[in-house]
Amino acid sequence: MKAQAQTTGLFVFMFIFFIGIGWLIGGFFLGNWILGTLLFLGIAAVMNLVTYFYSHKLILRSHNAEIIEEKDNPQLYNIVKEVAREADIKMPKVAIVPSNTPNAFATGRNEDNAVVAATEGILNILDEEELKGVLSHEVGHIKSRDMLVMSIAATLAGAITIMARLVWFQMFFSRRRINPIFLVVMILAPIGAIIIKLAISRKREFKADKKGAEISKNPKALARALEKLSAENKKNPMKSKSTTTSSLFIVNPFKKSTFVKLFSSHPPTEERVKRLREMAKDFSYL
């Protein structure tokens, strides 16, 4: 219910934001705020439809992920099958991302469209229990229906960032006087998008850690995996233009500037590990 409310809220926010931008751009560049509003209302409608039905496909394509069958990678496929059974959800599709940076993510609007993706790099540095912990975390996102909310947030952040760049470019070559309100909106919009993505993804990462530990019944293995992944991703960040999808991964796979660190989409690894090790005390067999 909470995930549905957040999804609806994000869709509504996307409509309102684009209508507002259309009103400003229509009045500033087109001289007709009604035309601008209608134009961007149409853009918002198309983006909402595309995000809802195709966001998972776009995300997989942006990272060149390929859907696999059991024969392609029995270990990965069977672990996903095992943790999906433990979580009592439908078997998601499994994909491999051709990257040496060790990481994983889940995407899809619901269980019927869910995909668990792992990079080639993660298969090389984690042992089986650690990999099971990571995949349990991703299945935890599916169980909690996080993927659509996080995909919408990532798409929204990307769209706002691209739009702001285009408007800045237009303003740079325009001889017209710049409206101060318009200027403030263009400065604050990308920051607002980052904050929205941050607020959604941080809380959900803690929740997915907890759910993943419960599914795998091994919080310590997930804690070890997070430490390894965090260290390796800092040394060998992923090279991709799709950095707005960072919140979908179990740890941020991209190189972080000082500004990005202030608005990180993931909670500190140290805090996540601490919570998992506290959880481990409740597992009497560990």
Image (cartoon, rainbow, N blue to C red):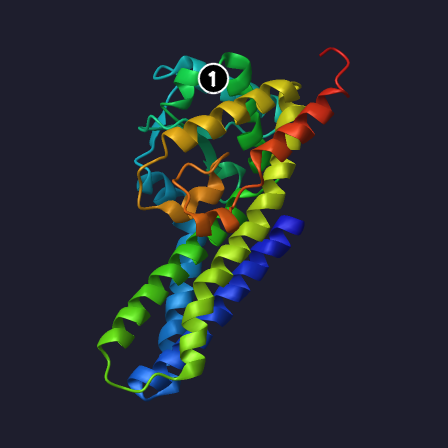
* Label 1 neighbour load within 10 Å: few <14, some 14-19, many 20+: many
* x and y, in percent, of residue 189 in the image: 45, 66
Q: Residue at x 62, y 49 (%)?
A: 3
In the displayed structure, would residue 13 be above or below residue 32? above
Which residue does the numbered mark 1 point to in the structure image? 126
Residue 157: x and y, percent? 44, 56
Residue depicted at 72% across the width and 25% down the height: 279
Labels in figure, total: 1
Q: Position of residue 192 (x, y in %)?
A: 50, 62
Residue 275: image quadrant is top right
User: Height in image: 152 above or below 22?
Assistant: above
The residue nearer to you, when weighing 217 against 279, is 279
- Secondary structure under tag 1 reads loop
Most extreme residue toward the top, as rendered?
285
Question: Which residue is at the far front?
Answer: 258
- Quarter holding the C terminus is top right
- Residue 13 seen in render: yes
Q: Nearer the viewer, residue 205 or 44?
A: 205
Looking at the image, which is closer to me, 236 or 102? Answer: 236
- Asked if residue 1 can be seen in this view, the reply is no
| Location of residue 69 by image quarter | top left
Residue 124 rendering spot, x and y as whole percentages = 39, 16
Give left or right: position of 7 versus 281.
left
Q: Amino acid at mark 1?
A: Leu
Relative horizontal placement of residue 46, taking residue 139 as reference (left or right): left
Q: Residue at x 49, y 30 (%)?
A: 230
Is 80 drawn above or below residue 42 in the view shown? above
